[in-house]
Image (tube, rainbow, N blue to C red):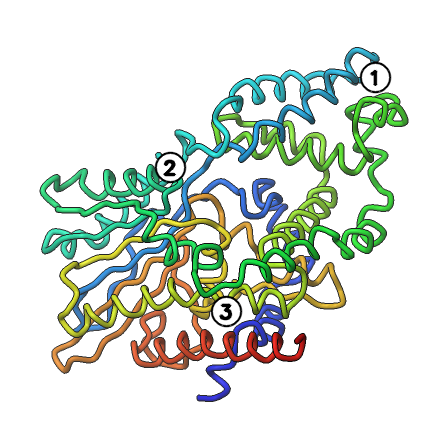
Amino acid sequence: MRKLLTTIIALAVATIALAQSPEAIREMIRENSNFSIPTVTTYQNVPIGKIAPAPKGYKLFYYSLTGRHGSRYELVDTTFVYTCNIFNRAAKLGILTEEGERVRKILNRATDEQRGKAGELASLGQVQWRGIGRRAYRNFGELFDKGSIEAKSSTKMRCVFSMVSFVEGVKEKNTKIFVEQEARESFLPILRPMIDNPASPKQLIYDCRNTARQGEWRKEITEKLWHDGFNQTLSKLVTKPELLKECGAPTPFWFLYRTHHLLLFSQNFGFDNYEMIRSIFSVEDEYRFYCYQCLSWLSLSWGWGNDNAAIFMSYMRPLVDDVLTKAQDAIDGRNPHVANLRFTHDSYFVPLTTILGLEGCAATFGPDIEKSATSAPLSKVVPMAANVQMQFYRNKAGEVLVRVMLNEKDATLPIECKTAPFYPWDKFRALVEGNMAELERRRDAILKKRN
């Protein structure tokens, strides 16, 4: 049991080494260019057929969901404007190729579409969550028909409208289902615990992120992954790369990275640039972009290094406790709802999957930064509209099994049992509580050593 409860942070090296590798990430990108922009990937297709039935004698009695908002616009308009201006200046200098001119026109259109909508939920985000709700009702509607649903959201409107869209999908077949939907400041310590948790030290978080922004890894990864090898790709867009700096691009890598990112990101609000991306960028280009963005997100979200990541995740307890407590209340007959829904953001969703023990979800930092970047397939873990769904089943003997689904697919847990992917509740709860406690123990030890 002690081995089972070892924190996922430590477990990640052994677990993910089996599931992920640089070549595995390359293969994922070959499958779909969309996977080359981790954490802002559009939600992927899900299985069409029915889910596997519960073991004989077990009946569904409770449902829990924690999700990230759906596809959104970029958080600031300048992300598009700055890159678009580089292309416009290059056009005035006459250094764009025919393909470069095509990209320029698309980026100008995307910039116009983005303008004034920073951080808002896109129409695609509504479609994603409505579809998730529709499929949830198809699979678990007999439960939703029997009682009320409680839904809570971060106060960010992209989360609120994601919640509303999911509920719309659930209620398409039964408009009489009562859903209590709320988005209040008082919920934020639960839904955004690392920032709004009163117990989290704000100065410590600031210091961790400030260290990440200094980015010692950036120099190393630049030398390791993008020192050269982009000349062929550059030649598809510009005739005189040496003039890019005059147009406002700090480096050729930055120019290509931002171009690729925005062409793909704009698919979150209706642009389909897949064919163009495949014609310009190689899988190796996209792999390098993936690594850079993955490390950027990990370090800026949690701070660089395993210790800082452990500290950040140790303040996830309010959300973890909310998931576990409401599930236990449902088991004990104290929860007035048949389902509890929570809508939050990527920075909290990923730690939750880690603490829940979902295999292959935990990223780890190490001396080999390429291995760190590929330690977890973040594109598949936390796309837009990412969700963890948990269904609880009970037999006549009172034994409870829980099924955990990541993005509507069964997740694997480090729990030995004959009923997987339906796991004994007591073992699952022990796993999660052990992981949470170990993170807090490790945090206290790290801070004591630092002081």
- Pointer 3 or 1: first along the chain: 1
Task: Classify mark 2: helix, strand or loop.
Answer: helix
Q: Residue at x 57, y 27 (%)?
A: 77
Residue under label 3, please give it: 314
Residues under numbered marks 3 and 1 in contact, where contact means CB atoms less than 8 Å apart:
no
Tell me if residue 315 comes above or below residue 94 in the rendering. below
Tell me the CA gap for discs 2 and 3: 27 Å
Query: Mark 2, residues whose alpha carbon is within 10 Å: few (<14), some, or many (≥20)?
Result: some
Outermost residue to the bottom:
2
Residue type for callout 2: Met
Label 1 sits on residue? 95
Give me the C-alpha separation between circle 1 and circle 2.
42 Å
Image quarter for residue 168? top left
Q: Quadrant of residue 449?
A: bottom right
Within 10 Å of disc 3 (Cα), the crowding (few <14, some 14-19, many 20+) is many
Which of 100/113 is in front?
113
In the rendered image of this protein, does residue 361 appear above or below residue 245? below
Disc nearer the start of the sequence (1/2): 1
Query: Relative to 266, does residue 305 appear above or below in the rendering?
Result: below
In this view, the residue in front, 303 or 36, is 303
Kind of residue indicated by mark 3 = Ser
Disc 3/disc 1 C-alpha distance (Å): 51 Å
Front residue of 278 and 360: 360
The mark found on residue 156 in the picture is none
Q: Does residue 62 appear left or right of residue 348 in this picture?
A: left
Q: Which residue is mark 2?
A: 157
Q: x, y (%) of residue 127?
A: 35, 34
Q: Amino acid at mark 1?
A: Ile
